[in-house]
């Protein structure tokens, strides 16, 4: 039995996990060319899309500390 994950958006719309993966891959322009795909290309594209999304939404200090003071 396979679990089916569904994401519910704030506007009430639902999205399946494969649709979310495809949307993220497309959003970052990582879709592998259809005629040149090799096994595992889609999984790599999804992984890279999640990495980019994580970097895009990650917490960042507004005023990063200057590491020069710590090295002295």
Image (spheres, rainbow, N blue to C red):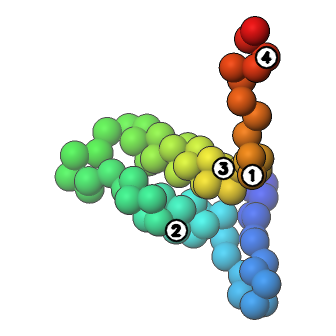
Quarter containing the C terminus: top right
Instruction: Assign the N terminus to one quadrant of the image.
Output: bottom right
Q: Report the residue at 62% width, 47% height from top.
A: 55
Q: Is residue 51 above or below residue 24?
A: above
Q: Is residue 18 left or right of residue 3?
A: left
Residue 65, percent from left and from top: 76, 34
- Residue sitting nearer the eye, 62 or 21: 62
Camera-near label (1 vs 3) is: 1
The furthest residue to the top: 72
Q: Earlier in the sequence, mark 4 or mark 3?
A: 3
> In this figure, which residue is indicated by the disc labeled 4?
70
Circles 1, 4 touching at the beta carbon (< 8 Å): no
Instruction: Tell me if mark 4 has few (under 14), some (14-19) or many (20+) residues whose alpha carbon lies within 10 angstroms of its own.
Output: few
Cα separation, mark 2 vs mark 3, equals 15 Å
> In this figure, which residue is indicated by the disc labeled 1?
62
| Mark 4 element type | helix
Q: CA distance from mark 1 to mark 2?
A: 29 Å
Sequence-first tag of 1 and 2 = 2
Q: What's the mark number on residue 54?
A: 3
Mark yes or no: residue 24 visible.
yes
Quadrant assignment, res 4? bottom right
Q: Which residue is tagged 2?
A: 23
Quote the CA–CA distance across marks 4 and 3.
28 Å
Q: Earlier in the sequence, mark 2 or mark 3?
A: 2
């Amino acid at each position: 039995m396979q679990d089916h994950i569904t994401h519910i958006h704030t506007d009430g719309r639902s999205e399946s996990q494969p649709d979310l993966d495809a949307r993220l891959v497309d959003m970052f322009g990582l879709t592998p060319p259809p005629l040149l795909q090799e096994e595992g290309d889609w999984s790599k594209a999804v992984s890279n899309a999640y990495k980019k999304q994580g970097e895009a939404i990650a917490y960042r200090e507004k005023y990063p500390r200057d590491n020069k003071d710590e090295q002295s």
